[in-house]
Image: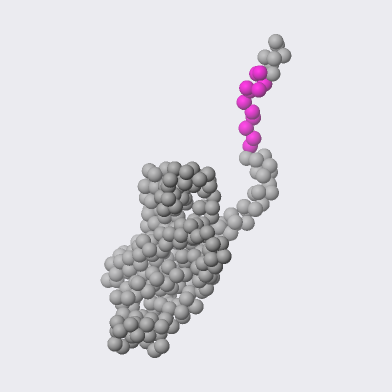
Amino acid sequence: MQEKSEITIERIRPKKKRNIFYRYFKQFDLQMMVIPGLLFIFIFNYIPMYGVLMSFQDYNIFDGMRNSPWVGFKHFEMFFNDPRFMEIMRNTIVISGLKILICFPAPIILALMLNEVKNMAFKRSVQTITYLPHFLSWVIVAGFAMSILATDNGSLNIALEKAGLIDEPINFLAIPQYFWTIIVTTNLWKSIGFASIVYIAAIAGVDQQLYEAAALDGASRFKQMFLITIPSIMPIIVIFFILEVGNLLNAGFEDLLILGDDAILRSVSDVLDTYVYRVGIGSGRYSYATAIGLFKAVISVGLLTLANYLARKTGNSLW
């Protein structure tokens, strides 16, 4: 009996908690895979944070950060009092909002549609065709857009003329009213296929027995999509939506700089990133550009936190 009681006591005795170094060396092979990524983030994301101090200085490249005079919130006040502040913020929020409204659900819809395709050859062909634009640079994509919208031999103008909808070619890229539609459409064409990969993978992981049980109960493929597929991938959708909200002030740079770098279109194409590039960096106003970048970063963190807080109510959140 005594031996049995000793064995029982030994079993229920709490195990000694291993220290962090023991656990590190226990998973040494896995840690070695993580370390390069951590070093990359530390070198290129954390060390440059020292540069945000320039936003509180009148930075001079000859004096350096140590000798440049401190001016407090001078550059932030200059930006807030800029006559174009409201116009730039409007363009940034509207363009980014349109991208979220249209370009965010489009890959989900494409993934759901491809999931219903039974012909594998056709399915793979559609996936390949929609993936390819992602690997093209914005210079090439903008070239395609300019060729399609050109007044001389542009395919869109030719189609509209033959359909009798217009009498003479329209210079779409010189009319501000069309710019937001053009920029969102080109972004949709470029990103829809590649962005759908995650959702296609998530759908592939859904338990097939759920579909079989639903089919036995008489549920159509349309009902199965709404009752099984979408709820199953909802955590992925919510996480990506949180990240999209956090990037609300990142309306784009390359696409807007190439397609909208025209004085006629500045009133609708200038966003925070392009404004920083032209006015801040292009004119050598590094402290002013850094102040705008810091303002954007703070707002983005706030939006990300708010979106995560609201998503937590649904049971899906990043933290």
Q: Does 249 sit above or below residue 215?
A: below
Q: Nearer the viewer, residue 284 or 318?
A: 318
Residue at 62% across / 26% down in the picture?
14
Q: In the image, what residue occupies the spot 35% across and 72% down?
A: 181
Residue 198, given in percent of the width and then of the height, sits at 51, 57
Q: Residue 109 sits in which quadrant?
A: bottom left
Residue interval drawn in magenta: 8-19
Q: Position of residue 36 (x, y in %)?
A: 63, 56
Corner quadrant of residue 6:
top right
Where's residue 296, x and y in %? 39, 61
Q: Nearer the viewer, residue 47 or 132?
A: 132
Vertical side of 307 occupied by 92: above or below: below
Residue 45 in view of the camera? no
The one of 275 and 77 positioned closer to us in this rendering: 275
Furthest toward the right, the residue is 3
Image quarter of residue 16: top right
